[in-house]
Amino acid sequence: MNSTEVKLALGALLCSIGKLYYRGSLISAEEYGYTALNSIVKISDPDILNTVRYHKLSDKFTASLEDNAFAYIVNLAKRIADSSDFKKHKLLSAGKKTPLKSIFNRLNDNSGNSFFAPQILGEEKYINYPSDKNVSVDREFYQKITDRLTRSIQGTKYTAASFNALLSDLEALTSFIPASASDEELGDISFYDNAKITAAIASCLYQYADGNTNYRELFHSKDKDFLKEDAFMLFSMDISGIQSFIYTISSKGALKSLRARSFYLEVMMEHVIDELLEKLSLSRANLIYSGGGHCYMLLPNTDTIKQAIRSFESELNAWFIRNYQTSIYVATGCAPCSGMTLENGDNNSLAKAYHNVSQEISQKKMKRYSADEIRALNSQSYEGNRECRICHRTGKVDGNDTCYLCSALLEISKSIQKEDYFIVTTEKLRNTALPLPFDCYLVGLSEQDVSVALQSQNYKRLYVKNQTISARYAANHLWVGDYKNEDFDRYAEESEGISRLGILRADVDNLGATFACGFQKAGKDTYSNLARSATLSRMLSIFFKHYINLILSDGESRYLSKDGKRKVAIVYSGGDDVFLVGAWNEVIDAFVDLRNSFRRFSQNTLSLSGGVGFYPNKYPIHIMAEETEKLVECSKDIPNKDAITLFDRDNSFGWENFIKGVMDEKFKLLNDFFRSDKRSETSQTYGSSFLYNLLDLMRNSDQKINRARLAYLLSRMEPKGDNLEEKTHYKNFAGKVYDWYPNKQDRSELICATYIYSYIFRDKFNKTEERK
């Protein structure tokens, strides 16, 4: 972006900044963003000031505007962005304290009226769950954020990097502040999302004009006709092969390498996004969503942009071929859309655009490479001919039989947890720098090393992980789920009962359908528009990339472990999916916490399904990943999904059945009976043999004689003597087991509970068997 493009984007981003200062009682009228920028922020650039001052095109102020004034661009961009939430056009003075309403209020036929508390993203001590309590945003909070925002704006230079840094600061400060403070509006679009989309649309309009500087005629006089024109393009990029790259590894220390490989690909995706935006002279305001190797952008629909995308895609795949052969591949797709589509999803057109983009990407994946690319693959030569002990690719290896990339990933795995700064350069700063597309490299740095690195002629850009606003560096802020408690090698031995690793894989159910039609109601696009799609995407990212760290550090479920810090680590947590590893019992409780938190956060409009596998410490990582993915598929086969699968397909349950049936009822019964202090020491002779016999009878329930065998097995457990309390306890246990046996659902839940109980108390059973 040149300085002119940055100034236009800044004017669009800040055109409503007066609202914040007005609500904090720092200026007398909210419409005078000019006053805030000129008098308080001390911006003197006339291009920015005039764009903000005149963007409403009021006759009182715009009589002398030139035809090429940016105010015409920003006016239309703001109208498109506002269309989702400003239909009443009421004065906002009565709503100064109105909080942000939840984006989930109207999702998937919900009719909620929940609010978010005012918070600064990244500084909260708790998860900002939507609440029915109508909290208020007081003047002091607005003064706090405007004070910090003033410093951020003052530190902004007219470069793309500086603009992107301001965008990150604005996200932290205004994610939970409403764009519309009127009680008569839906009020579910944050100030940040509205400002960001306004800037994105303005940048698209500027490029779409393609040298025609009569903005008055193009975007104002003929605005109604223009809104029907396909001036915009919904763009998506998808990187395939991520799971194979991350999980198809073996060797000692593979678990430690998992997190490094996942983080490497996550930063690589962000780097690729930034490279494309740089080539297109756009900013991160145009990025709607990124996560899990996938992204969406809003771009201008021009031939120049289309050609640049084709060239970019070809160059990127050529780099992947040189470095990873066919294991990683990128595909892009785009669909034209009009201003009316962005405003209200006219005639379901926004859903169609998402569908068309997806279809184009799918078609490219079916026919990946061109003839030239195939010839390049067939003629490719390798430097060295030995196999890497970790990734098994053929090439040059070091003395430890490790290729350069795997060696660098092992090295960076040490800094991922402790370092917050990651710099991209055009030359290696260290021998262990990770390669990135377009001849760049990635290195983790401590804060004291950043200033020196930024002075290098090879400096490209800086990423900051999990930090709130800072005007010190022009950096892109990334939220990353990076929770870790205990060393990977200790998880199995830290487990309760049997020594096993737990692997969890889970993702959000029906997310594609939710984005396509989640805001429709009764067949109409009542609430469907780009603003809500973008806001929903970002809220999901906040949950899975930020709040997940809080959830795991303060676990609440106590079925199989204590509450508090979970003995688990995040391998990956992105826009809608999770991969955790840890002590097996802690992983189950962590999954319960995640599911419950997600349902609460999404107001029960979305659900989370997944699988949990249990493995010995030395089990190959890629097999664990593959088998657990199959468990996820089992959960997705459950009607209405919202399910968990443990062990195998036979242990798939809807979440309500698992929590209430398996854990609260069956597991509790087993736990109460076998661990009860109401039975004498001499009666505690029921070891693992009883549970194994019980499991065998339940698994073979089709044999009629087994019901008689069950009655016999239970009768042998009846305590001898006259202890009435002991006998009552036994009758309760035996009666429930016998009643559950003929019912398929109860029997399945009891089998699963028995498996879990035998795992959690394996050591206890072994000691019991020794006494017998």
Image (spheres, rainbow, N blue to C red):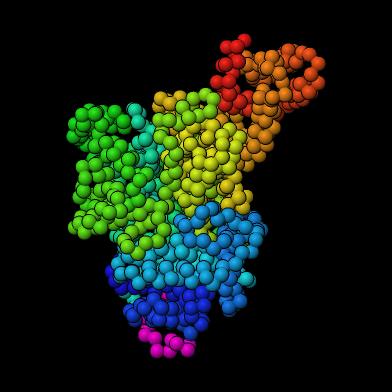
- Residue 136 location (% of width, % of height): 60, 67
Q: Where does residue 721 sit, x and y in percent of width and height?
A: 78, 13
Q: Is residue 323 left or right of residue 605?
A: left
Residue at image location 35% in from the left, 72% down from the top: 154
Residue appearing at x 35%, y 51% in the figure:
420
Determine whether 307 is above or below 79 in the image: above
Q: In the figure, residue 754 lies in which quadrant?
A: top right
Stretch of the chain drawn in magenta: 59-74
Res. 706 in view: no
> Outermost residue, top direction?
772
Q: Quadrant of residue 310?
A: bottom left
Which residue is located at x 48 percent, y 65 percent? 174
Q: Say which quadrant the N terminus sits in.
A: bottom left
Quadrant occupied by the C terminus: top right
Name the side, left or right, on which 278 lies relative to 516.
left
The answer to whether residue 769 of the structure is visible from this angle is yes
Q: Position of residue 329 (x, y in %)?
A: 34, 43
Is 69 contained in the magenta span?
Answer: yes
Measured along the vertical axis of the image, is residue 680 above or below residue 582? above
Please tell me which residue lies in front, 456 or 286.
Answer: 456
Q: Nearer the viewer, residue 406 or 38?
A: 38
Query: Residue 537: x percent and y percent?
Result: 49, 55
